[in-house]
Amino acid sequence: MIVLGSASFELSPFEQVMDTGTGRKTMLLGAICCAAGVACNAVTYSGTASTEELTYVLAWGAIIFGAIQIVRGAANRGPSNQQ
């Protein structure tokens, strides 16, 4: 329950779910996916640097998905959950 002056409000089920750390978990998942995509790019590109072959993996999907998850997680944390 939230009390503002003389008025009090109950949290909706959505707000209760968002208050359980879901945003932090979403941000962690996004950071892991983004880091894995960057690592995949770096490893495959560095493996082709010493050869004449220029075939390597670009994991843009993982990087973009991770970035989106980080933003969604930050939005779900809300101002009341920031430390």
Image (cartoon, rainbow, N blue to C red):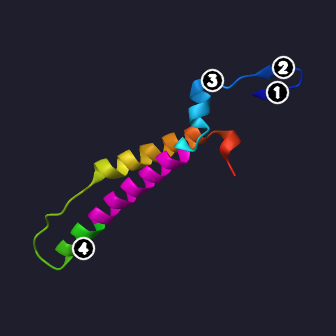
- Which residue lies under the disc numbered 2? 7
Relative placement, left or right, of 8 versus 39 is right
Quarter occupied by residue 48: bottom left
Q: Main secondary structure of the magenta part?
A: helix
Of callouts 2 and 3, which one flags the residue occurring earlier in the amino acid sequence? 2
Question: Mark 4, residues whose alpha carbon is within 10 Å: few (<14), some, or many (≥20)?
Answer: few
Which mark, residue 46? 4
- Element on which disc 2 rests: strand
Using the numbered discs, state the Cα–Cα distance from disc 2 to disc 4 in whole angstroms. Answer: 61 Å
Instruction: Report if the CB atoms under discs 2 and 4 are less than 8 Å apart.
Output: no
- Residues in magenta, as a range: 23-41
Which label's residue is closer to the chain start, 4 or 1?
1
Residue 12, label in figure: 3
Q: Amino acid at mark 1?
A: Val
The amino acid sitting under disc 3 is Ser
Who's the residue at 10% across and 70% down the image? 53
The answer to the question of whether label 2 and label 1 lie on touching residues, with beta carbons closer than 8 A, is yes
Q: Secondary structure at mark 4?
A: helix
Q: Position of residue 28 (x, y in %)?
A: 47, 53
Q: Secondary structure at mark 3?
A: loop
Residue drawn 37% across the image and 54% down it: 33
Is residue 29 a member of the stretch shown in magenta?
Answer: yes
The answer to whether residue 33 is magenta is: yes
Tag 1 secondary structure: strand
Inter-mark Cα distance, 2 to 1: 6 Å
**Mark 2 residue type:** Ala
Q: CA distance from mark 3 to mark 1?
A: 14 Å
Disc 4 residue type (three-letter): Ser
Distance between the alpha carbons at the discs numbered 2 and 3 = 16 Å
